[in-house]
Amino acid sequence: MSEQKSARSKPKGNADKPAQAGVTDGEIPRPAVPDSAQVFTTLGAVAWLMGRSPAHRHLFMADLDWLVLPPLQLGQARLYHRDNQPIAYVSWGFLSEEVEARLLAGTPRLKPTDWKSGDRPWVIETVAPFAQASALEEIVADLTKTVFGGVRPNIIVVRSRQKVHGHEPSVW
């Protein structure tokens, strides 16, 4: 299983210097943001996965605007592949106490500003119609190590989309 890393934006600066993601001429770090082509390519793969997922196939296209685009644009999502085939998409947020409370109360729709509102690590969405439980554990282990600094995140689990709209998520 491999992951697709987001393409990074190139900093402004001298053309003769090699570009280093996240660094400007003054060496002040800035967040690396995926470029639009990568966002759109990943969005297509995520939509394809959602179309094959019983828990996601009945979502509206408009749901991509709040469920998929913000984490893609913030670099808080990964697409995993096996044999050059997308098998899983995962998005995460660092939530404030207030946003976490809303999520636990059954309001799964995050505003764009909610995704980076605090320091509480959460896996917000997982679309994995072809992945076995062991693959999902590998994905969580990868994110725990590479994104969350060794801290296992809370994971929102929704058994079906009806329950999301009926406000019955649980935590794994």
Image (cartoon, rainbow, N blue to C red):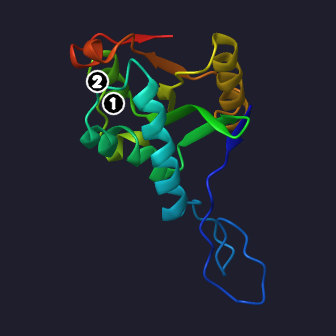
Say which of 160 and 93 sits in front: 160
**Image side of residue 135 versus residue 154, left or right:** right
* Mark linked to residue 99: 1
Say which of 7 and 40 sits in front: 40
Give me the residue at 28% from left, 38% from top: 63
**Image side of residue 42 versus residue 115, left or right:** right
Residue 151 showing in the rendered view = no
- Give the residue at the far left of this rendering: 166
Amino acid at circle 2? Arg
Q: Is residue 127 above or below residue 169?
A: below
Q: Position of residue 10 (x, y in %)?
A: 63, 73
Location of mark 2 (residue): 102
Give me the residue at 64% from left, 71% from top: 28
Q: Are marks 2 and 1 in contact (CB under 8 Å)?
A: yes
* Mark linked to residue 88: none
Q: Quadrant of residue 7?
A: bottom right
Q: Position of residue 79 (x, y in %)?
A: 59, 39
Give me the residue at 54% from left, 32% from top: 90
> Label 2 vs label 1: CA separation?
5 Å
Q: Is residue 152 above or below residue 44?
A: above
Mark 1 Cα within 10 Å, few/some/many (few <14, many 20+)? many
The count of marks equals 2
Q: Quadrant of residue 110?
A: top left
Amino acid at circle 1? Val
Q: Secondary structure at mark 2?
A: helix
